[in-house]
Image (cartoon, grey):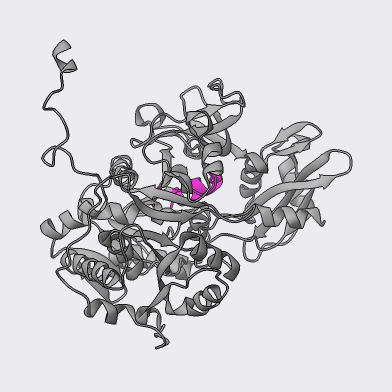
Amino acid sequence: MGWMKDETGLGKTPANYVPLTPLSHLHRAAQIYPERLAVIYGKHRATYQEYHQHVTRLASALAGMGIEPGDVVATLLPNIPAQVEAHFGVPACGAVLNTINTRLDVSTVAYILDHGEAKVLLVDSAFIPLAEQSIAAMDGPAPTIIEVADPNAGIAATGNYPEYETVLRAAEPDFGWVWPEDEWESLALNYTSGTTGRPKGVVYHHRGAYLMTMGTLVSWHMGQTPVYLTIVPLFHCNGWNHCWMIPIVGGTVVCCREVTAANVFNAIADEGVTHFGGAPIVLNTLVNAPAEERRDFDHEIQVFTAGAPPAPATLSKVAKLGFNVTHVYGLTETYGHVTECLWQADRWDGVDEDQTAGLKARQGVAMPMVEPVLVRSSDQSTVPHDGATPGEIALRGNTVMKGYLKNPEATAEAFKGGYFNSGDIAVQHPDSYIQIADRAKDIIISGGENISSVEVENTLMAHPDVLLASVVAMPHEKWGEVPCAFVELKEGATEDVAALIAFSRERLAGFKTPKQVVFDTLPKTATGKVQKFELRKRAADL
């Protein structure tokens, strides 16, 4: 192999090197699947040819408004076709897509618009008041608004701004897409939830998104022409990059503006949905849906769930409805899911129901687009694979963010030791599968003993009356802090604190048993994750 040391004439050329970008996926799909349905939303039915045309016109319109490569274009949109189109149309003019959480407050939206320096803002008509108030609160230049009406939901345009469809009709249909010269160029800007301060701007590059789509296809065994339902908000990790992925296999994206059990079951029965992603709360919604909201279907639905460790009891129940759930794990900083609880058929087929649910509740192993995922102790050494020694999940690979926008200190801290340090506390089992014990900040330390809030939550979720449970630390004079459970009950169930505590005590060590139970509606993010920082505030006042 000594001859390889002389690489004269073996450099990169246009013939052997093209920057990786998810833009390639739609460009290809429009050529080979022109008449296949690409996007569905009620009466809206767009073929790949039409989808590509909408994207091209959006890119043209933005360029005509003065948007240049590297500029930021933001959106305040639910999961509707315009949001799907923006994922390709914004980068197709060289710009960076910033999808903003529609459930944020005015102050936070204003901060994001200022910090990201958005030049244009696509806004659903229902969120025009939020956009206007946020722009009024900005310190910097205001973005130009393009309003997106939603006739499918009965939401008409205000008439105060250029409307999306009108803007597209006036745009150039033959606009030449702006392709990245370097795959490291920024593709998207996503903001963290900001539960402990101002949100941080996470920057994605074209290469990472491209590899994310390829790795997901392999892990999810999607095959050709899947029908994907957009339950994960497209403003959260760009919907785990799934809309960038679906054109590879000529699939169909079914938009879902509002996630309800009826909407999910209707999409499966009427549109033939085969795949969707969602938080465990979505699975809970399906399991507890009343009979009148359910529809029959005769095919198995493949589901990725993430956002919080799913309770084994929930996984067991949803499997009986026809949903094959794979637990995945990731963060905004990793483009979404990067580990999967890969099912080992040769070892696990035939185990009983409880064992199956327990195995599937783990966060699993690295997906194909990620390097090995480690669990490391505070000195950055790898913890023993004993299923008991806790450490922090550390990740490395091409689907780790470029860094935090305008925050080199936070970026350096996140990448300390040559890995992205997640802040999630986990154990690693002898078979190398990881399992989250808790977020570092959610561990309850009672009398010097560590208590996993996840373990207590899973126990409570096994109670037949419990719809949702979340456990946080409550200050205690003697023990420092003790577990406090916030519980949502199923309809018709009776509030009985003593019964829930007794149920927990039968299954947990005494010090892990909740010392107080509060029946209340739990505060949640747009993706269905419980906002524990709010519950900690409530617990502190008890």
Magenta segment: 305-324
- The quadrant of the image that shows the N terminus is top left
The question of residue 318 being in magenta is answered with yes
How many numbered marks are there? Answer: 0
When asked about the image quadrant of residue 162, the answer is bottom left
Q: Is residue 33 above or below residue 447?
A: below
Q: Is 208 in front, or is 177?
A: 177
Q: Position of residue 403 (x, y in %)?
A: 46, 44
Q: Position of residue 354 (x, y in %)?
A: 52, 38
Q: Is 508 in front, or is 306?
A: 306
Q: Position of residue 215 (x, y in %)?
A: 31, 40
Residue at the image position 23 percent from the left and 47 percent from the top: 223
The question of residue 311 being in magenta is answered with yes
Outermost residue toward the bottom?
A: 159
Residue 277 in sight from this viewpoint: no
Q: Is residue 507 above or below residue 82?
A: above
Residue 18 in sight from this viewpoint: yes
Q: Position of residue 393 (x, y in %)?
A: 53, 33
Outermost residue toward the top?
A: 2
Residue at the image position 22 percent from the left and 80 percent from the top: 170
When asked about the image quadrant of residue 76, the answer is bottom left
Residue at the image position 40 percent from the left and 79 percent from the top: 153
On the picture, is 434 further left or further right than 520? left
On the picture, is 537 further left or further right than 46? right
- The quadrant of the image that shows the C terminus is bottom right
Residue at the image position 26 percent from the left and 49 percent from the top: 21
